[in-house]
Image: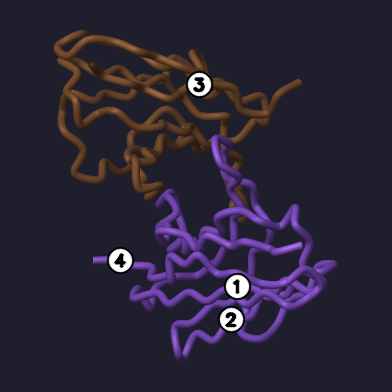
Amino acid sequence: DTAVSQTPKYLVTQMGNDKSIKCEQNLGHDTMYWYKQDSKKFLKIMFSYNNKELIINETVPNRFSPKSPDKAHLNLHINSLELGDSAVYFCASATANEQFFGPGTRLTVL
Amino acid sequence: QKEVEQNSGPLSVPEGAIASLNCTYSDRGSQSFFWYRQYSGKSPELIMFIYSNGDKEDGRFTAQLNKASQYVSLLIRDSQPSDSATYLCAVFRGGADGLTFGKGTHLIIQP
């Protein structure tokens, strides 16, 4: 009965590959987010989706594309992975007052 | 540009003492303010949120907000070793905007 789940938990891949991270929430929230936490632990928003519509994109390279097949899912697809993409990626689901974070996906690009 | 500033620490506090964590923000349009705790290798966990000037208490935690000074703080009373973590301050403008986080303060409670 996990509120926000992500898969995979760990992802190790070569430069240039394309990969996806999946996120699902069972809270019935309308808004979901993707955050990136870099090696210095700085957590920064990447995307938000509200009712399957992209609301903001915080200067993220277009190699990153969020995809939402339905309100409960917000997946992150990354093309042509680069070394600098190595980070922990967190999905979150939100009410007006609280954001619930998933467990994170640690991406390592070799 | 929206910014949230925190002292990165580490902040070392003896067990049983009060830990005081501070945060300033630049966006005067911010409406809600959050404190998250993050243990190493784990996801952020909400400790408290506040949106009105003044104090808000929840158990050992008190959040303080001063919008005029653009300042938010978190007090942890009777600090325990299990409180050792990184504390992230975050602000929210409203609507579908995401949270803007500070870089976090690393808190160490010494037994």
Three-letter code, disc 4: Lys
Kindly identify which residue carries mark 4: B2
* Label 1: which secondary element: loop
Please determine whether, in this image, residue A5 is positioned above or below residue B5: above
Kindly identify which residue carries mark 1: B51
Image location of residue A40, percent across then percent down: 35, 48
Please determine whether, in this image, residue A7 is positioned above or below residue B38: above
Task: Pick whichever of labels 1 and 2 is earlier in the sequence.
Answer: 1
Query: Which color has been applied to chain A in this rendered view?
Result: brown
Three-letter code, disc 1: Tyr
Say the numbered circle drawn on residue A23.
3
| x 63%, y 77%: residue | B20
Three-letter code, disc 2: Leu
Along the line of sight, which residue is nearer the eye, A31 or B20?
Answer: B20
Badge 3: how crowded within 10 Å, few (<14), some, or many (20+)?
many
Please determine whether, in this image, residue B97 is positioned above or below residue A50: below
Three-letter code, disc 3: Cys
Quarter of the image where one finds residue B41: top right
Badge 2: how crowded within 10 Å, few (<14), some, or many (20+)?
many
Q: Note the chain letter of the purple one.
A: B
Kindly identify which residue carries mark 2: B65
Along the line of sight, which residue is nearer the eye, A9 or B54?
Answer: A9
The span from disc 3 to disc 4 (Cα, nearest Å) is 27 Å
Same chain letter for marks 4 and 1:
yes
The span from disc 4 to disc 1 (Cα, nearest Å) is 17 Å
Badge 1: how crowded within 10 Å, few (<14), some, or many (20+)?
some
Provide the chain ID for the residue under circle 4: B
* Label 2: which secondary element: strand
Kindly tell me whether residue A78 is visible in this rendering. yes
Quarter of the image where one finds residue B58: bottom right
